[in-house]
Image (tube, coloured by chain):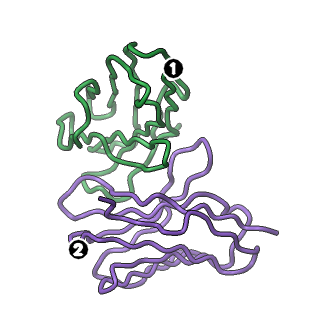
Chain colours: A purple, B green
Amino acid sequence: DQQVKQNSPSLSVQEGRISILNCDYTNSMFDYFLWYKKYPAEGPTFLISISSIKDKNEDGRFTVFLNKSAKHLSLHIVPSQPGDSAVYFCAAATGTASKLTFGTGTRLQVTL
Amino acid sequence: DTAVSQTPKYLVTQMGNDKSIKCEQNLGHDTMYWYKQDSKKFLKIMFSYNNKELIINETVPNRFSPKSPDKAHLNLHINSLELGDSAVYFCASSQISPTEAFFGQGTRLTVV
């Protein structure tokens, strides 16, 4: 039973354009959401997070949007750069649980 | 000065063997984790330790035994290795909440 889903396994975007990565969740107890970025042969690195009390969080080129009623979040990267090419994992947590539940990842390819 | 380091990076071993993966973090975090990324790229938590105490054990076979000699180290011992244990194992650490966990580079275990 996958509680965090990333339905797009891959996404290709031109450099300079916006990349939008989507994530859906089923567990209404999740109250904290994170995005991780992973390069090959490396561990995931934290990118940005959002608490369920907010609907938007912005950090430079990265913005995460949360729609609690739809149980959906998205990561916007603008403008996209070739160095953004990586696998992006969505993750969720509850305030009392000491673990992250990950989606299956979306591979982003930013082309020149 | 790697934040979370795990060794070895690659491990190839025969079925039935016993092996260990070591993990150390120098971030002063209270909580450490082991995650497993299988061939389908699912990244799932296996164990979580807080100040050397086991707090999460996600229905992992008891052939897997984590050991935490101190809060900066969490090692993973695997007995009687099976083909299905082949995966990438990631160590991670965080402060007491699960947010913004820092991951090691991963250990690719191949059982032949």
Q: In which quarter of the image is residue A65?
A: bottom left
Disc 2 element: loop
- Residue B79, by quadrant, is top left
Same-chain check, marks 2 and 1: no
Examine the rendered structure and indicate whether residue A19 appears above or below residue A36: below
Instruction: From this view, report whether residue A108 is shown above or below residue B101.
Output: below
- Residue at image position (72%, 69%) is A81
Residue picked out by circle 1 = B112
Q: Residues within 10 Å of mark 2 (few under 14, many from 20)?
A: few
- Image position, residue A14 (x, y; %): 75, 75
Q: What amino acid type is highlighted by mark number 1?
A: Val
Residue nearest the viewer, comparing A43 with B100: A43
Give coordinates of residue A52: x percent, y percent.
29, 78
Q: In front: A88, or B92?
A: A88
Q: Subunit of mark 1?
A: B
Q: Residue at x 38, y 20 (%)?
A: B81
Q: Is mark 1 on a helix, strand or loop?
A: loop
Tell me what residue is drawn at x 50 percent, y 32 percent.
B107
Determine the chain carrying the residue at label 2: A
The kind of residue tagged 2 is Ser
Q: Mark 2 points at which residue?
A: A28
Residue B51 vs residue B57, the one in the foreground: B57
